Amino acid sequence: MAERKFAIVIHGGAGPDSDFIIQNMAKYEEGLAHARDAGYRILEKGGSAVDAVEAAINSLEDNPLFNAGRGSSLTAAGNIEMCTSIMRGEDRKAGAAAIIRNIKNPISFAKKLLDSSTLMYVGGEEAIAMAKDLGMEIEPDSYFVTNHQVDVFMKAREARKGAFKKTFHRAHERLHGTVGAVAVDKHGNVAAGTSTGGTDFAQPGRIGDSSMIGVGTYADNATAAVSCTGDGEYLIVEALSRAITAMMECTGCTVQHAMDRIIHEKHGGSKGDMGAIGVDAEGNIGIAFNSDRMHRAWKISDGEAVIRIYK
Ligand code: ASP
């Protein structure tokens, strides 16, 4: 019997282009390849989609170039607030956490919650204490803060003199993105995960889409695993990952078709950046974004290994 197709797709955020991205192109590509291959190796050995998603996202969280884990963006108060979620398509179990800090790998904390029978979505100080109790790796604030993010923060503060008066988040000024991964394993199980440092100079306490099941992340073996990125305020009202899978459920269309309808046809001209990656249980992938770029990479067991940043 022919082996089932397995696959992984990852993203490193959708949004506007920047000089920083252009100057660091080779390093971004290297980081994407490293993360994709970390997940793919697990799938190749017969590991689960959820483990592959965690491994790929851990690699991006540890990479200071991406806005998740180390390298997270700074809020308008100059601190870090991270959000994350993971979902398994086999039993539609999920784990998610919002407004957390000091946890080295937020996605691994979300996975711990997925594996726990009681809690699914936690946030704030109590969640951080819980992560410590669960033995998650903890790092000081200085581990997460990069020169690049301090630079972005200083420029944003200068540009908005007296910015604390403007306590709302201006979505269209967001510079860099989140990370995510979707995978299907040799058993036909799918999984999706998303991890973020949020948006640059955001109002402290803001929660975007990335920790929300049905918005940033969704996975169901019957439809697909989807991870989203872009301006959280737009993604939340669209319930993007669930909108994509619901369209598949209702019309029987492919994950690519559902993404094209929602992201290109409905939101092509929208002011909000939107991006999504997806894979179904047969290994068919979907990728769409309406922004200048979406860092992304994928590998399908019977296909090539690909890395892309622009259209
Ligand atoms: N969606 C994330 C948020 O709004 C940011 C991103 O994907 O770049 O927090």
Image (cartoon, rainbow, N blue to C red):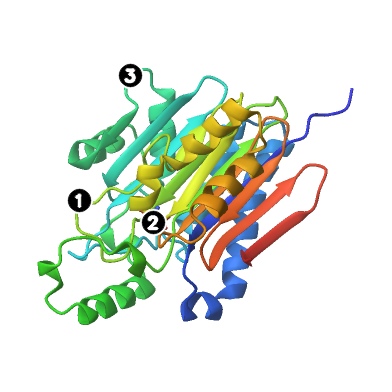
Closest to the camera, between mark 3 and mark 1, is 1
Q: Mark 2 = which residue?
A: 231
Q: Quadrant of the C terminus?
A: bottom right
Q: Is residue 194 toward the left or the right of residue 204 in the image? A: right
Q: Amino acid at mark 2?
A: Asp
Q: Secondary structure at mark 1?
A: loop
Relative vertical location of residue 270 with respect to residue 238 in this rendering, above or below: below
- Residue 130 in the figure: left or right of residue 190: left
Q: Quadrant of the N terminus?
A: top right
* Residue 166 quadrant: bottom left
Mark 3 Cα shell of 10 Å, populated few (<14), some (14-19), many (≥20): few
Q: Which numbered circle lies on residue 252? A: none
Residue under label 1, please give it. 205
* Residue type (three-letter) at the residue carrying disc 1: Gly
Cβ(mark 2) to ligand 1 < 8 Å?
yes
Q: Give x and y (percent) for residue 74.
A: 28, 64
Q: Is mark 3 within 8 Å of ligand 1?
A: no
Where, by quadrant of the figure, is residue 169 drawn?
bottom left
Image height of 195 relative to 281, above or below: below
Read off the residue under disc 3: 118
Please name the residue shown 48% across and 47% down the image.
Answer: 228
What is the spatial separation of the Cα atoms under label 3 and label 2, in whole angstroms? 31 Å
* Residue 15 at x, y percent in the picture: 47, 64
Q: Is residue 146 placed above or below 258 in the rendered structure?
A: below
Q: Residue at x 28, y 50 (%)?
A: 101
Q: Is residue 48 visible?
A: yes
Q: Residues within 10 Å of mark 2 (few under 14, many from 20)?
A: many
User: Is 248 or 275 nearer to us in this picture?
Assistant: 248
Indicate the amino acid at tag 3: Thr
